[in-house]
Amino acid sequence: MTIRLLTIPISHYCEKARWGLERLGLAYHEEAHIQGFHYWRTWRLSRQLLVPVLIDNGATISGSASILRHLERYARPQDKLYPDSPPLRARVEELEGWFDNVLGVESRRWFYFQYRRQPVSAILRLIAQRVPAHERLLARWLLRPMQAFARKRLNISLRTVETGLEQVGQILAHTDALLADGRPYLLGDRFTAADLGFACLMAPFTLPRRYGVRLPGPEELPAAMQTTARSICQSLSGQHAIRLFEEERPVLPSCR
């Protein structure tokens, strides 16, 4: 049975799942939807509204962390993202949870808030990649109401964005400290789910070229976004996230 992955294409949580599948060389079919249009499919498949959703041999798995854990069954020992050592595994899962619950939420909130006033055509080029034609057409007419709905659902405001960037700063101070001794990965000499998740959830700031769909180039961002993104990209943690995409992220066009 072909593995299926239900996504919002630009979602950095969905990128975690794509990366997990592709690093293991697993062929899959990606079913892509624009934000909001995905609800009926995710609810039908998983009785939840979360993406990504993985369908594998009759099993339905929701959420990027759960999907990465599920994919461990296909990994060779050297490819596992979660170490066998209980203390080290606990540290990986602790960092991954922190990144999922704070970094991913706040980087998304920042990007949505700052990018909201871009032309409709620019926003559609970003969010409508590989989605069904009818969704692309409907989104052209419904984009502004959809943005208002997203602002309310995700609690997006100047205040929450500023508070969120402070929390991101706390995470980056921690990861900077981890990386200060020159280690290649967050927890030492091994690439883990903590690194994979960190790189993906930093993507709204770092805009990696090897992301699963095309992200805007830094020069395409509004000026206020460029200042914040440049500062983060120049940090030790930002450079780590950029390097991970360049060196660790496989690109397998056949899986598209």
Image (cartoon, rainbow, N blue to C red):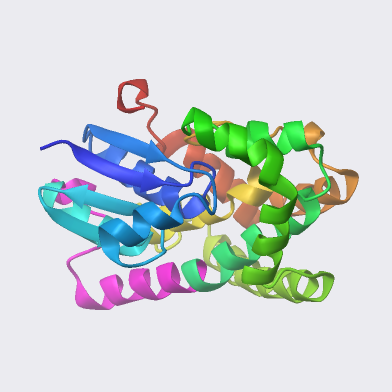
- Residue, x 45% and y 51% (percent of image)? 38
Looking at the image, residue 15 lies above or below residue 40: above
The part of the image, by quadrant, that contains residue 59 is bottom left
User: Which stretch appears magenta?
Assistant: 75-99
Q: Residue at x 35, y 67 (%)?
A: 48
Magenta stretch mostly in which secondary structure? helix
- Tell me the quadrant of the picture where the N terminus can be found: top left
Relative depth, front residue between 211 and 7: 7
Q: Is residue 208 above or below residue 35?
A: above
How many marks on residues? 0
Viewer-proximal residue among 41 and 239: 41
**In the image: residue 78, left or right of residue 193:** left
Residue 244, percent from left and from top: 48, 43
Which residue is depicted at the point 49% across and 73% down?
A: 98
* Residue 168 visible, this orientation: yes
Residue placed furthest toward the right: 223
Note whether 82 is above or below 77 in the view shown: below
Please tell me whether residue 90 belongs to the stretch shown in magenta. yes
Where does residue 69 sit, x and y in percent of width and height?
24, 61
Q: Residue furthest top?
A: 254
Q: Looking at the image, which is closer to me, 124 or 15?
A: 124
154 sits left or right of 195 in the view: right
Percent position of residue 108, x then y: 63, 58
Q: Quadrant of the C terminus?
A: top left
> Percent from the top left, x then y, of residue 183?
47, 56
Relative to 163, is 11 above or below?
above
Q: Residue at x 21, y 76 (%)?
A: 86
Residue 218 visible from this viewpoint? no
